[in-house]
Image (tube, grey):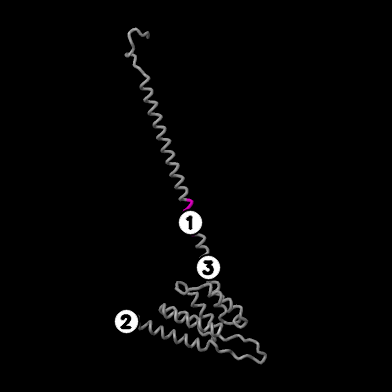
Amino acid sequence: MFKGMAQTIICRYAIGIISAILLTACAQLPLPADSSPQVPQESSCGNVLEFYTAVSHLSDLSQKEILQALRADVVENNEACSQLRLTLMLSRPSTTYQDDEAALSLLAVILHDFVASQHPARGLALLLVEEIDERNRLRATGRALQQRLKQGRSAAAVLRHQLQALRLQLDQLKSIEQDINEKERAGVGVNLKPETDREPHEPK
């Protein structure tokens, strides 16, 4: 009961944060007379880490609903802060919707945008890029190790087969040697006669 109430409270809290974020996502800072782009304030994106923490406490269904809302907002507004929040969602490990490739594409857009390049959250975007790159490197290393393990197992199977064939050949050679020895002993027994079996007239 208490667990359900807590999740409900967290869900409402997260939805409140996200609603506030999405309402202010399109707000543009005033430009000076020369129309040169200005550096946005930290509050323009809100606390993205607080958003990430709130989302992480929600159910899978609620997370997917938020993900869909962020996708729609990015498509409609193409705004850097929404892109950053969507990237946080897509880069969350151990989730069914994790998509590092899509997250990197969004981060590339954010980091190459002139205004976003001076954004206070640029450091977070760079950190996400490094984290995703490291995950991809570890995945590639894991795949290489699995390939080497597979090759090692195949080589071991070949060696076991060769060893089994050699043992069979050795058993065959032992059997042939045993047959030869038995025949030799049998032949010696037939050809030999004791001295007492000689006829009296036979010279010694």
Asked which secondary structure carries label 2, the reply is loop
Q: How far across and down, in percent of the image, does residue 169 sit?
A: 44, 39
Relative placement, left or right, of 19 versus 1 is right
Please tell me whether mark 3 or mark 1 is closer to you in this view: 1
Quarter holding the C terminus is: top left
Q: Which region shows up in magenta?
A: 146-155
Q: Give the image location of residue 166, x and y in percent.
A: 45, 41
- Drawn side of residue 10 relative to residue 90, left or right: left
Q: Circles 1 and 2: CB distance less than 8 Å?
A: no
Residue 195 falls in image quadrant: top left
Q: Are marks 3 and 1 in contact (CB under 8 Å)?
A: no
Main secondary-structure element of the magenta-colored stretch: helix
Tell me, for residue 56, which label it has, or none. Answer: none
Quadrant where the N terminus is found in the figure: bottom left
- Residue at disc 1, secondary structure: helix
Marker disc for residue 1: 2
Farthest residue to the right: give it.
34
Kind of residue indicated by mark 2:
Met
Q: Could you tell me how far apart the alpha carbons at marks 3 and 1 are, in whole angstroms?
A: 21 Å
48 and 95: which is toward the camera: 95
Q: Which residue is denoted by mark 1 in the rendering? A: 150
